[in-house]
Amino acid sequence: MRTETEHTIFLKDYTPSPYRIVSVDMDFRIGIDNTRVRAQLTVEPREGTAPGTPLVLDGDELSLGSIAIDGLPLALSAYAADANGLTVVEPPLRRFVLETEVTIQPEGNTKLMGLYRSSGTWCTQCEPEGFRRITYYLDRPDNLAVFKVRMTAPRDVAPVLLANGNLIDKGDAGDGMHYAVWEDPFPKPAYLFALVAGDLGSITDSFTTASGRKVDLAIYCSHGKEDQCLWAMDSLKRSMAWDERRFGREYDLDVFNIVAVSDFNFGAMENKGLNIFNDRLVFAQPETATDANYDGIERVIAHEYFHNWTGNRITCRDWFQLCLKEGLTVYRDQEFTSDERSRAVKRISDVVTLRSAQFPEDGGPLAHPPRPDQYREINNFYTTTVYEKGAEIVRMLATLLGEAGFRKGMDLYFERHDGEATTIEAFLQVFADANGIELEQFKTWYLQAGTPRLTVAEHYDADKQTYTLKLKQETLPTPGQPTKAPLVLPIKFGLIGPNGSPMGWSGVSGAEVRDDMIVLRDGSAEVVFTGIPSRPVPSLLRGFSAPVIMETGASQEDQLFLARHDSDPFNRWQALQDVGMALAVDAVQGKPWSDAAVAALSQAMGDTLGSDTLDDAFKALALTLPDEQLIGRTIGKDIDPGAIHDVRKQLLRAVFGPLSRQMLATYNALASTAPYAPDPASTGRRALRNRMLSLLVGSDAPGTSLLVAQQYDAATNMTDRLAALSTAAMAGTPEAPTMLADFRTRFGGDPLVLDKWLTVTAAAPRDGVIEDMKTILADPAFPRTNPNRLRSLVGTFAMSNPTQFARADGAGFRFVADFVTEVDKVNPQVAARVLTGFRIWPMLESTRREAAKAALTGLSAGGTLSRNTADILTRMLA
Ligand code: PHE
Ligand code: ZN
C-alpha cells in the first residue's frame, strides 16, 4: 500500500517550540479565482533557544509569493518552502515580524479543511490542522496568539464579512470590494481561527450576562432559512444561562456569532466567538425536522458554546490531550440536557449510544485509549472513545467526588489554568488538590483502551445473616496493549428487600463502600454485608456509574423484580433489556426460549406500558429489545447478522404480539392535535406513540401496515412522518415503496430531507438495497462532494445495515470499499470515517470474515490512499 507520507507522532516526543508567535495580523484578499493571504507574525524566541535554531512553520498546499523579516525581503538562501511548510534558516534571536504572502484556492478545496467554499460562501475549518492550509504558521494548539484580521471581498457575492472577536472597522474598498476588520483580544491557538464571507441572511437576539454585560447574538444562514434558526437561538440563550448557573461561567466577548454551512466534515466547530455549524445542526421546523433533530441542535449548540471555557479559554497542549476539551465538554452538554429535560431518559439514551458506538470501537481493531500516546493522522482520533468515553471518565470523577467536590475541582481548573494550553495530568491535579485526594490509579482510565468486564457473583448466608458480593474486573487486550491494570470502578448500588423496598445493613467489609457506592480498585474483591435478614436482590451499577460490561448471571425472576421495584430508573430499564438479551442470545445459539420466559417478559413490558408513574419517554425506551448489533457483540464471535435479525424479529413478535390490543389503545390515546412543540412531554408522547406503531407492525397485528401508511399521509410533523416511513421501510410493508417515492418528491429540494430519505433507503435490510444505492450514486445530479449526503447513504449502510453490509457474498463489503476508494480522492476524512464501518469484521463468521478481509486487502492493493484512509486500513488489518 502506498500512502502519502508514513510518520507516527508520539506523545513522549512532545517538546515546546523554540519560537512562539505572540500576535498575528492578517490581511485576506478574497477573490473569485483565488485568495491572497498576507500574514504578519510577531515571533519571539523561547528562553534558551540557541542561536541558529531554524524557525519551522507548517504549511500545506500554499503557494508562497513573498517573504520578509522586519520589512526586509529574505534572500533565497535564508528560507526553504516545501510541501510540509516553511523553514527560516537562521531567524534573529529577538522579537521580529515575519511577513509572508501566499495564494490559496478555496474553490477547489474539496477536503473542507482550511478556507473553502460551501454553496458560494467562503468559510474556514481549522481544527485540528487546517490553519496551515491558510498561511505558514506554528499550527499546534500550544501556541497562543492574539489575532487581528482584515478581509476584503467583492461586496455583491460577500456582503457579510465575519471573523473571531469584535468588529473594529469596516468600509468600502473601491472596485466593488469592501472590507471589515475583526480583532480577538483573547490569545488563542490557530485551530480556533475562523472567517466567513458570503451572502447570508441572519437572525439576531441578545443575552445579558450575570454581571450585566449585553452580548449581541446572531445566527447566519442562507437566505430564506432564517425562520429555521429560532430553535438554535433559543438553545443558545439557555446554554449561556445554564453555564452561569451550573458552573459560574460567563461569556467574555461582546458578540457571539454562529454560521450554518452546508458542507462540513463534522457537526460543528467552536471557533472563538464565531462558531461554524453543519446546517443539519441548526435548521429546524416541524415539517422537516424530527424530535431527534431538535434534540441534536440543542445539544450541539450547547456543546460548542460550552467549549468557550472548556477548550478555548483553557485549551489543549497537544492533540494527544484532545479529550481534555472534548470529554469534558460532552460531559457538560450531557448535564445541560439532563437539567433541561429528563435526567433518566438522557442517561439511558447516552448509554445506548455508548454501547452501540464506543463499545464496538473499544473492542475492535481501532481500539485506543481516551488519551492516545501515538497517531499517524490526528483526524482519525475524533472518535467516540475520545468524546463519549472521555465524558464517562469525567462523570465517574463527579460520582466519586460528589457534586460539591467536583465543582470545587472545576472552579480550581478555571482559576489555575485560564489562558493556558494544558494536559490531562493538570486536569486531574485540580480535583486531587481541591479535594485532598490522589488520582494516580484513576488516571489509568485515560491511558488504557478496552471496555472492562465486571463480573459479579453473590452468596447469601441465612445462618450468619450475611450477604456477599464477589466482584471481579478484567480488561481484555487491545492493539498494542497486551496487559491491563485494574481500574477504579465506582459502582453505585442498592439492596432491595422482598417487599421491594430498600434494605439496609449493619456493617460492611471487603472493599471501600460509601453509602450507596462500592469503589472497586483491585482486580477482585468480596464485599460482605452483615445484618441481612433475608436474601436481597442487588441493584448494581445504578445510573451506569462506570462504563463497563457487567455480567451478573442474575435470574430472570430477579431481573423482572428489579424492572418492577428498583428506585433507579436506569436499572429498571436495564433489567428489561437484560431479560430480552438473554432470550435472544440463547435463541441465536440454538437454545429456543421457553413460553413461560417469554410470557413473563411480555407481562413485564405490558405492566411498564400501563404504569401511571413512568413517563412516556421512558416507556418508549423500555419497550424494545436490544438492537441486532448489540446482540451480536454480546455473542462476541462467529456472528451471522442474518440469523440475529431473524431471531430478534421472532422474539419481538413473541413478546409484543400478546400486547397488541394494549399497544393499539395506547397508540390511539396518544394521538394529539396540538401544534408541534419540542418540549420533553410532547417529544416523549410522540416517541411512545411511534414505538407502538413499529411494535404493532413487528407483531404482524392485522391492519397495521395500513395504519403506518395512514400515519404517514396524515402526519403534520416530520417526527411522525419519518417514523412511519422508517417503520414501513424497515419492515418492508407493501406500501413502503409508494411511501418512499412520495417522500422523495414531497419536500422538493430540501437537502436535509433528502438525507432522511437516503438514510431510510440505506438502512432497509432487504436484497436490492446495494443496487438502489448504486443507482442513486450514479445520478449525475447527486451531490457527491457533500459529506452529509454521502454519510447519510453509505455511512448509514456501513454502520446500520448489518445484514446487507455483511452479506455472505461480500457484495456489501465490496460496495463500501469501492466507494471509499472514490471518495478518498475528494474528501479523505469522509472516506476514512465510512471505512471504520468495517471494524466488526473480526467478529463475523468465517465466510463473511473472509469476504470482508478480501475487500479490505483489495483496497490496500489499489493504489495511493490518503493518510487518513491508509491509517484506518492499516489498523483494521493489523
Ligand atoms: N471540535 C469540534 C467539536 O467537537 C469537532 C470538530 C473537530 C469539528 C474537527 C471540525 C473539525 O465541537
Ligand atoms: Zn467538542
Image (tube, rainbow, N blue to C red):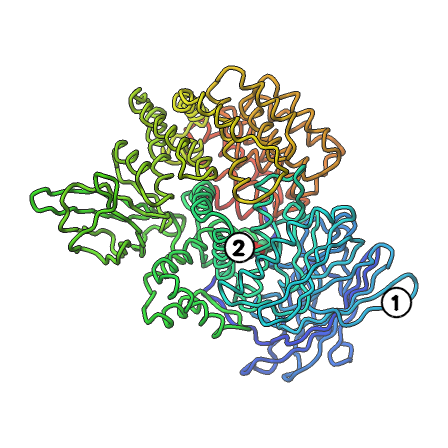
At x 73%, y 30%, the residue is: 779
Foreground residue among 360 and 210? 210
Q: Nearer the viewer, residue 607 or 163?
A: 607
Q: Residue furthest right?
A: 175
Q: Tell me the number on the disc at residue 376.
A: 2
Instruction: Look at the numbered disc 1 and give the secondary structure of its residue.
Output: strand
Note whether 103 is above or below 497 in the view shown: below
Disc 1 versus disc 2: nearer the observer: 1
Whether label 1 lies within 8 Å of ligand 1 gets the answer: no
Relative placement, left or right, of 40 versus 186 is right
| Residue 769, quarter of the rendered image | top right
- Drawn side of residue 637 relative to residue 81, left or right: left
Neighbourhood count class around disc 2 (C-alpha, 10 Å): few under 14, some 14–19, many 20 upward: some
Crowding at dot 1, Cα within 10 Å, few <14 / some 14-19 / many 20+, comes out as: few
Residue located at (55% from left, 22% from top): 766
Q: Dot 2 lies on which element?
A: loop
Residue 172 circle label:
1
Q: Where residue 248 sits in the image (x, y, percent)?
A: 51, 67
Distance from mark 2 CB to nearest ligand 1 atom below 8 Å: no
623 left or right of 460 in image: right
For residue 518, say whether it is visible: yes
* Amino acid identity at mark 1: Asp
Q: Residue furthest top?
A: 702
